[in-house]
Amino acid sequence: MTGTGQDTSGGTSSDLLAAVARILTPDGRVAGAGFLVADTVVVTCAHVVEAAGSGPGHAILLAFPRVEGAQAVEGQVPAELWRGAEREDVAFIRLAAMPAGARPLPLGSAEGCRGHEVRSYGFPAQAPSEGHYGSGVASDVLPATEGRSALLQLTDANDLTTGFSGGPVLDEVTGLVVGMLTEITAPDRFARGQNIAYVTPTQVLREVLPELVEQAVCPYRDLEPFKEEHARWFQGREDAVRQVVANLTRQQRLTLLLGPSGSGKSSLIQAGVLRALTEGEVPGGDRWLTVVARPRQDLAAEIERAGLPGARTDGIGAAVSRRLASQPSHQRILLVVDQFEEFFTHAANGHGALDGRRANASTVADQIVEAVDSHTGLSVILVMRDDFYPQLAALAPGLLAAATPGLLNVPGTLSDQDLHDIITLPAADVGLRFQPGLPERIVSDVLAVTPEEASTRQAPATVLPLLELTLSQLWHQRKDGYLTHEAYRRIGAVSGSLRTWCDSALDELSPSQRPIARRILTSLVHPADPSRRIPAVRTQVALSELRELAVEPGETPGADVDSVIATLTRHRIITTQTLRDPRKADATPGEPVAELIHDALIRDWGTLREWARQDRRFHEWLGATRERQARWAEKADPGDLLGGTALAEGIELSQKRRPSDIAAFLSGEDAAVGAALPEGIILFAETSFRQLPRNPPSAGGPARAPDQEDASATSGNVTEVEPVKPSEPAPCSVPADQESS
């Protein structure tokens, strides 16, 4: 496909210069303009090609005067892409290669750009030989007639004169090309009708060459966080940004930012606070170097990968010193650890976390405290879900004590004005309009999500994912530059938008694929552990393992599994990525992993919430069995092997789905297991696993009666065993003077 799909950045003046070409006659005179719409593809007017002495099926000469070092090149005018001047007046030119430094312009739509200022570039006789800019204002699109194609009318187009024909017309609001300048009107005998020009809309260009991709700027983010490049669309959170900036200004070197899932913590830092730094709201902040990491499986390794080499081997403080020494233009490093709750889900995973994993977590926590205390050139922001506060108190009390003076809570509510700004300001920035009354309708529906808050005209911040998703879907269904009431009704308003969005993905699947989708999705949910006060959260799973978990035992993952993963990825319900080894600069890509796009799916999508509840027992068992398997591989302690009730439970649950490594562990076919196990235990494990007898004998002993210890397990009804609860962690308290922050 030609083009690059959706682009949220749009074009700029420098992009115009890198894309615009002079169309030349054989003797080098300028016949008009053209511009790159894709790699090696230039578009211009058919009448410009004819003025250059060429035509369909012939060669033509062109040059890119604003691309440094570019020479005149020859292109071909494909006959099949020729539309004569009497009709669409469009000609495409194919180049043999892209000139170095040249790049195509992003294409948008002429619909909905009325009133927007536009810019072009051309080569009129009165301009320098390299050309100059022209401008105007977009009016309306004139419908196509039997004799000609649709045209976008421009007004105030005095700058656009002969020599601009074939030039791009760039919408200054969206940064996208909305058409090609085709015609300039001549005034009548009373000098009326000046300053009017006509543009061939990009829709017409795409009709001639359908593989051109029409790009568009969506100012909303679905369930993804706003990042620094989206800062212009991050609205309605000014007070929260000011609180964090004040902490940094006071030289509070360790900030702990707490908030519920879905309250916009990641966006607040990446699109709000980091923008404030670059704009100088913190003295010297424009000379700070920002490093953003997530804990994932190994926080120290992730910090290293994010930009602090040596953090895993030499410590965070040493890595900071090295980085600042290598870049003296930076005065300070701001280390942001986003989704810090992952630090605890991996440190205390399953029913019996590995001692090494806990020890590593404790070491990294101590390193953070030590680095902040000892290094004046380091500031740290830990961004964490507030429901993980007890884990922080229990597993890293030293880190909590150090962070408490800088503890901040994300404001828990959004005002009526906050909501209105979040809804309308991003749209205005890219030239979108709402039908009258729609923003107010959306605000009312957001407030109605929690009726107890509606009377105060406040909404919980946790509604943000639903609101952003709703606005994104409205954008996808926009009509002529408007977000409409009808589209809002179709997507199910705010309360139904998530269900509509997710269910539309499931509706694309066949009946045989839906169970595969269920297994995939629930495998990406880390089960809640009430005994440790750990809520259900999303988790990363290697794609190879996810494919095994998606099928029944004994089946081989095939095209159906890949098709389901592709569908869920296309609908942005899951995301995939490939991580590199942070310890090696030249490392090859690692194993691809997948995860849910946001924790809001677990909380607010009823289908997934119910599936996760039904599959919770299996995933708890799988996590615990992996822990036992890891301990066995490390210590070869026979106590970690499955037996009795645990083996019977494993046999039952493994009939649902069974990764290959767990199958080997259960069956005793793992080479390490087989080498160390007594023959009787191997025989017991293999017999239990393969023959599934109702009352399996113990190794060397008689069968037990159903009313003995393992009767319920051997009969297929496994007794739920209450896990041993750890000592109660410290209550979730915050300093009195921080309570309202």
Image: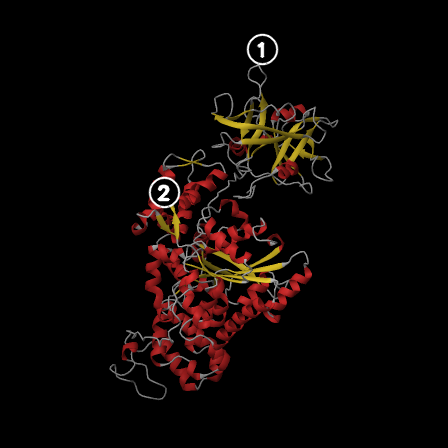
Q: The residue under label 2 is which amino acid type?
A: Ile
- Disc 2 + disc 1, Cβ < 8 Å: no
Per the rendering, the mark at residue 718 is none
User: Which corner quadrant holds the N terminus?
Assistant: top right
Left or right? Give the position of 148 relative to 514: right
**x, y percentage for residue 589?**
58, 61
Relative depth, front residue between 360 and 641 = 360
Label 1 packing within 10 angstroms: few (<14), some (14-19), many (20+): few
- Quickly name the residue at label 1: 189
Residue at x 43% of width, y 77% of height: 628
Q: Is residue 76 visible?
A: yes
Q: Amino acid at mark 1?
A: Arg
The C terminus, quarter of image: bottom left
Q: Residues within 10 Å of mark 2 (few under 14, many from 20)?
A: many
Q: Nearer the viewer, residue 676 or 392?
A: 392
**Number of dots carrying numbers:** 2
Label 1 element class: loop
The residue indicated by pointer 2 is 442
| Image position of 627 with respect to 262: above or below | below
604 vs 562, left or right, is left
Q: Dividing the picture into quarters, in which one does residue 105 lie? A: top right
Residue 524 visible (yes or no): no
Spatial distance from mark 2 to mark 1, Cα to Cα? 53 Å
Up the image or down, 506 lies above or below 713; here it is above
* Sooner in the amino-acid sequence: mark 2 or mark 1: 1
Under tag 2, what secondary structure? helix
Location of residue 442 with respect to 198 vertically, above or below: below
Provide residue 48's location: percent of width, then percent of height.
64, 25
Relative side of 696 to 268, left or right: left
Name the spot of residue 466 as percent of width and height, x first: 39, 50
Residue 484 location in percent, x, y?
39, 37
